[in-house]
Image (cartoon, rainbow, N blue to C red):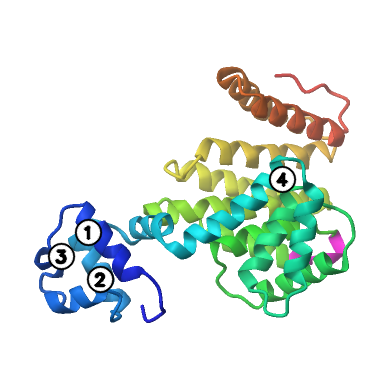
Amino acid sequence: MNEKNQHGSIFKKLREERGYKLKDVAGDVISTRTLMRFEADETSISLAIFEKLLENCGLLYLDYLAYYYENSTKEIKKREYVNKYINLVQSGSISEVVNECKKELKKTDIYYSKRLEILYYMDIMGWKEDSVLFNENKRIISEKLELTNKLGWDEIYALSILISNGKKDEYSVEYIDRIIEDCLKNISSENNFIRFMGIAYCTLLHTALAFLSRNGYFELAEKRCKETLQLYSQNLFLISIESMYNTALGILAKVYLRQNKKEGVELASKAMKYYSILAEITDISYYKHVSDHVYKSFCEVNKTGIDIEF
């Protein structure tokens, strides 16, 4: 907690909003005077003590992080910066976004987190044109990820982007399988924070499974897809479990369709029913677009000659 930030003052704001007095929160954890100094951002405290203070407020650390994100001046400025890019993308000013990202990548002191953001922006815009700067950014991120034993939220999504756009010769099957194994171990509904992180791991898991499928590693892909479906069926409290299950089912369907197996048609039809019902119930054009896109992707790999019905 020794970094110059607003943790103390933001904790004070949170405490007062919840109606807790200094002495009640301090309890037997720390002295009231020390808590006052912390809330004035004059001193730091250990993470263990901070977590106990949160417990005395009836909060989990994840609750505090969400509150900090909403109230920190640093985070507010960061959101303003992100919103600037989002507005440019929504207005169709793709070239402006690309130019802004290039300016950032040219800086000698660019932060790693900024590199991850730029990778994300280029992905959501579907930017495929070759660029020395963007390719170098991918290389730097990839090398960093390979040296990291425990990935953070943004890093998990970054790896998902890299693998989803990666070619067969860029990643060994052994490396992809290690990623799948790591994801399977980290997807759980044990508590709220782990369930939250599970969203990222599910995304990476699906990307890795799809990599195996489209590159012809059918036996391993089938095995891992079935393990994924079994894991999902045993963790019904995962966030968006029905969507996660259906995505994995769709990947397994493509594994079979690519091998001219009729089981693929049956699974694809089941998966399409989910997207079709979702689009019909919500009447949201986005889900109709997703449904059409998924159906087209099934048809492109369907070698059975049997129509997919739903």
- Kindly indicate the quadrant of the structure image that contains residue 108: bottom right
Q: Residue at x 71, y 62 (%)?
A: 176
Do the residues bearing badges 1 and 3 touch, measured as CB atoms within 8 Å? yes
What is the chief secondary structure element of the magenta stretch? helix
Position of residue 128 relative to residue 144, above or below, is above
| Location of mark 1 (residue) | 15
User: 89 or 211, which lies in front?
Assistant: 89
User: 187 or 136, which lies in front?
Assistant: 136
Residue 143, disc = none
Do the residues bearing badges 1 and 2 touch, measured as CB atoms within 8 Å? yes
- Left or right for 8, reference 145: left
Mark 4, mark 3: which one is toward the viewer?
4
Tell whether position 88 is magenta: no
User: 233 or 242, which lies in front?
Assistant: 242
Q: Callout 1: helix, strand or loop? A: helix
Residue 39, disc = 2
| Location of mark 4 (residue) | 89
Give whichever of discs 4 and 1 has the lower sequence position.
1
Position of residue 293 relative to residue 197, above or below, is above
* Image coordinates for residue 243, horizontal then vertical, percent: 57, 37
Q: Callout 2: helix, strand or loop? A: helix
Q: Callout 3: helix, strand or loop? A: helix
| Location of mark 3 (residue) | 25
Position of residue 269 relative to residue 190, above or below, is above
